[in-house]
Image (cartoon, rainbow, N blue to C red):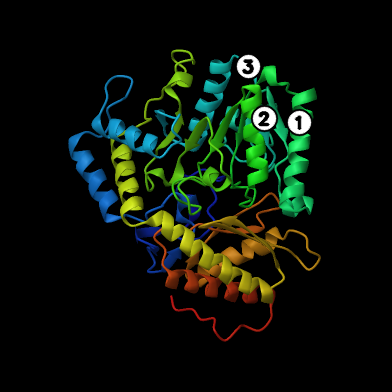
């Protein structure tokens, strides 16, 4: 088919050549008869896999009842029930939920809430974090130049602090944490003093920067400073939440309790839904009209969200993410021992990044692009990220992935490494489709 026959924006470029016909569970089926194991899961959206029967049933049932009941006009039962379920999963102090459509909208809502509720103008964000593409959230995003260039100047009142990336700084966790906290203290002294700092906004495990985790020393240091100075701690769990990292929320790895949580992606298994959760007392300090949106909290999306939480609980998908994540990391470390072009392996649970480097140890985005095509040709669908031309191949399969599927995917990945870089293919590698 001639690509010019259709009329999508030319900037909407796909990482694969697949025209999907249907999808189920771990698999995508293309119109030309291809079958692909999906380790991209809609950029971490399909937590329960494609078309999970319970999610589909819940959505179909809700469509028969009411598709959209705009929540500034009337309430519907799914939005009430889902708000209750989300609060059950939050720290004790968080008892109020605002729904929107996308992660960037939830981040925008958290910025508005922080500024209005505290009366302070500034937000401290952290280098490498991705919070969205709309103008407020984009001002706090520094994961790559591509999302920012050509639209600056951005919203003011944002200061960017270092994130404790141990690989980039070539430091141990403790040293990287101490360095980042020392720089943060300097920022609080000379750029955004506490009396002007409304919030610190952070991904506990960075997404687009290459699946870079924070650490306990650093995250607890943030909480101490926020508590001391009356600064809100906002956790962006858009990608790391909903069981993806082997715990329900990424921040749980570090023993902290945020004041505000934003999430999206895996919350509704592919239906458009995001949320911001915060204490009702904090929400009440914002101004009337500061929260809203035509489609936020759509009834069908909320029904899908409820079913998603049921599946995550009943099928023990958080536990599966932890177990399969440990298996995946061990398998990838074994591959790394034979392939020095894997310079680093980062992440937690089923949010793993393999950082590709060239013979000089420099990030290799070209190799990342070749790897995606080689994996696709072997029936494995993956995506990449990272600030250096997309040199990080990321592993974010649906949380339903099995041990056998992890093994098969790693085998195809190693075969693709051999194919794109030369060398002898290990005998164990095979393409079983």
Image spot of residue 76 (x, y percent): 25, 29
- What residue is disc 1 on? 185
CB under 8 Å between callouts 3 and 1?
no
Q: Is residue 334 above or below residue 29?
A: below
Q: Nearer the viewer, residue 325 or 264?
A: 325
Sequence order check: which comes first, mark 1 or mark 2?
1
Q: Secondary structure at mark 3?
A: loop
Mark sitting earlier along the chain (3/1): 3
Query: Viewed as shown, does residue 58 lie left or right of 194?
Result: left
Looking at the image, which residue is at 50% across and 34% down?
261
The secondary element bearing badge 1 is classed as helix
The 10 Å Cα crowd at callout 1, few under 14, some 14 to 19, many 20 or more, is: some
Q: Earlier in the sequence, mark 3 or mark 2?
A: 3
Tell me what residue is drawn at x 52 percent, y 45 percent. 252
Residue 319 higher or lower than 115, as above or below:
below
Image location of residue 381, percent across then percent down: 49, 63
Quadrant of the frame with the N terminus? bottom left
Q: CA distance from mark 3 to mark 1?
A: 18 Å
User: Which residue was labeled with disc 2?
Assistant: 225
Q: Is 170 placed left or right of 7 in the picture?
A: right
Residue 120's tag is 3
């Amino acid at each position: 088919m001639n690509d010019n026959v259709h009329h999508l924006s030319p900037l909407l470029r796909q990482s694969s050549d697949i025209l999907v016909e249907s999808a189920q569970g771990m698999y995508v089926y293309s119109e030309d008869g291809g079958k692909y194991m999906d380790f991209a899961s809609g950029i971490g959206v399909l937590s329960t896999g494609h078309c999970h029967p319970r999610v589909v049933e819940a959505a179909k049932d809700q469509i028969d009842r009411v598709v959209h009941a705009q929540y500034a006009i009337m309430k519907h039962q799914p939005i009430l029930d889902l708000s209750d379920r989300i609060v059950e999963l939050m720290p004790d102090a968080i008892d109020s939920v605002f729904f929107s459509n996308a992660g960037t909208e939830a981040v925008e809502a958290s910025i508005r809430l922080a500024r209005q509720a505290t009366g302070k103008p500034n937000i401290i964000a952290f280098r490498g974090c991705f919070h969205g593409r709309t103008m407020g959230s984009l001002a706090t995003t520094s994961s790559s130049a591509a999302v920012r260039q050509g639209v600056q100047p951005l919203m003011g009142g944002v200061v960017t602090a270092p994130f404790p990336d141990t690989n980039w700084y070539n430091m141990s966790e403790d040293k990287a944490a101490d360095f980042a906290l020392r720089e943060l203290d300097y920022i609080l002294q000379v750029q955004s003093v506490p009396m002007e700092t409304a919030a610190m906004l952070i991904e506990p495990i960075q997404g687009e920067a290459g699946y870079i985790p924070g650490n306990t020393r650093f995250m607890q240091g943030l909480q101490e400073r926020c508590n001391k100075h009356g600064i809100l701690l906002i956790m962006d769990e858009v990608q790391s939440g909903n069981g993806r990292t082997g715990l329900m929320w990424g921040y749980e790895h570090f023993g902290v309790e945020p004041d505000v949580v934003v999430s999206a992606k895996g919350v509704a298994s592919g239906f458009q839904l995001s949320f911001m959760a915060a204490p009702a007392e904090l929400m009440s300090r914002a101004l009337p009209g500061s929260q809203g949106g035509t489609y936020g909290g759509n009834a069908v999306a909320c029904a899908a969200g409820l079913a998603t939480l049921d599946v995550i609980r009943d099928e023990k998908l958080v536990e599966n993410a932890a177990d399969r994540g440990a298996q995946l990391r061990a398998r990838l470390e074994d591959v790394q021992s034979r392939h020095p072009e894997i310079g680093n392996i980062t992440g937690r649970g089923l949010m793993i990044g393999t950082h590709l480097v060239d013979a000089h140890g420099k990030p290799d985005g070209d190799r990342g692009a070749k790897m995606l095509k080689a994996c696709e040709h072997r029936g494995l669908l993956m995506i990449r990220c990272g600030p250096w031309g997309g040199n990080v191949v990321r592993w974010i399969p649906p949380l339903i992935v099995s041990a056998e599927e992890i093994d098969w995917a790693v085998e195809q990945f190693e075969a693709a490494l051999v194919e794109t870089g030369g060398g002898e293919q290990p005998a164990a590698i095979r393409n079983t489709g």
